[in-house]
Amino acid sequence: MTPEAYLNLVRDLLPAVRERAAGAEKLRRLPDETFADFQEAGLFRALQPRRYGGYELDPATFYQAVMEVGAVCGSSAWILGVIGVHNWHLAIFPPQAQEDVWGEDTSVQLSTSLAPTGTVQRVDGGFRLSGRWSFSSGCDFCQWAVLGGIVPSVQTGQPPDARVFLVPRSDYAIDDNWHVMGLCGDAPLYRLPFGLVFANGITAPAIGAALGALEAFREQSLKRINLRDQSRVAEDPFTQYRLAEAAAAIGAARDRVLGNFAEMMRLARAGEEIPLSARARCKWDAGKAIDWSVKAVDWLFEASGGRGIFLNNPIQRAWRDVHAMRAHAGNNPERAAFVFARSEFGLPPQDIRF
């Protein structure tokens, strides 16, 4: 599968995804038809190992696809980005874990809930998990879950151990509580830092939503007429300034994310270590990409006038979606700033994911 062929598969599905965008909000999850289309087209296989039917594409190609989906439906892009990254995550698990999930069916998907909100106990032969985990995007379509947990230390005085646990669907139940305001290996690919692949998987949908808002604003402004003097809104300097500022911010966000992963894949293919300073900068760029995307959509929404608040206007949905995406702990620009700043000052990293 070439990058061009993969992106063409994505683009072929965009009209249908756009038509289902409003229905996705009412359902509070991805429509079955959209998930089936993504599965049939193999979109979740972008970062999956070839030995299990995957394409092992560069992350930049995958994030480009997520952005393009996000331009027509932020929620669909979020699910594609999150579940697609999970297939990369499983590829760095031990071989037996990969075989357990994909051994009989390589199309099986898994969700994650990495915040260690449940309880983990040491027992003979392993661990026992109990309690509740939260926020597991796409879990309705997945047969496995990866759960984060804190394991008590064996020796007194030693710090606890942070781990992840692979759990089959038969061992957990899903509580339908998603009532919200938005988002209603061996190959070089698998040598990339865990934190950065995950971080950008939830950054790309926001960039895509912002791109969709920009396109909608451009089209709407060309048609709007100022009722006071019958002038074209597209000729208003305020409107032009807002479009220019938003386009610059969104373009910068997109280019930094895709450029960073192109460079990381170059280093990975060359067998070179990805320096901590580069990882810290990539994390900061992902944080700024979220910041720029949110601000850009804010500018466009504010410049849309009264029409911007109607529920059939895609700009207001993009506004809600990007703010919901920004609320994710992994999309916190302030935390990313500390990662980058410590690196710039030559201080040791405090985030184990890098």
Image: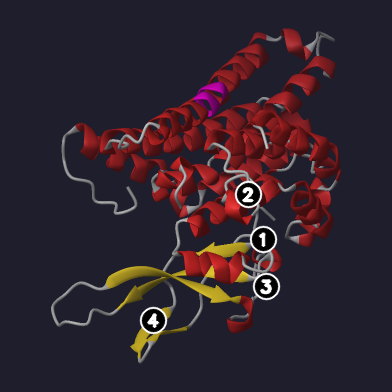
Badge 3 amino acid: Asp
Badge 2 amino acid: Gly
**In the image, 195: left or right of 55?**
left
List the residue tagged with mark 3.
Answer: 176
How far is the residue under mark 3 from the one under mark 2? 31 Å
Q: Which of 280 and 125 is in front in this view?
A: 125
List the residue tagged with mark 2.
Answer: 54
Q: Is 24 above or below relative to 337?
A: below
Badge 4 amino acid: Val
Q: Is 234 above or below relative to 101?
A: above
Q: Percent from the top left, x then y, of residue 45? A: 65, 49
Which residue does the image show at 57% across and 46% down from the upper left?
Answer: 47
Please tell me which of labels 1 and 2 falls first in the chain: 2
**In the image, 58: left or right of 227?**
left
Please tell me which of labels 3 and 2 falls first in the chain: 2
Q: Nearer the viewer, residue 77 or 300?
A: 77
**What are the residue bounds of the magenta stretch?**
251-255
Nearer to us of marks 4 and 2 is 2
Q: Which of 231 and 247 is in front in this view?
A: 247
List the residue tagged with mark 1.
Answer: 106
Please tell me which of labels 4 and 1 falls first in the chain: 1
Whether 328 is among the magenta residues is no
Badge 1 amino acid: Thr
**In the image, 34: left or right of 337?**
right
Mark 2 Cα-neighbour bin, 10 Å: few <14, some 14–19, many ≥20:
many
Q: Is 154 above or below relative to 191?
A: below
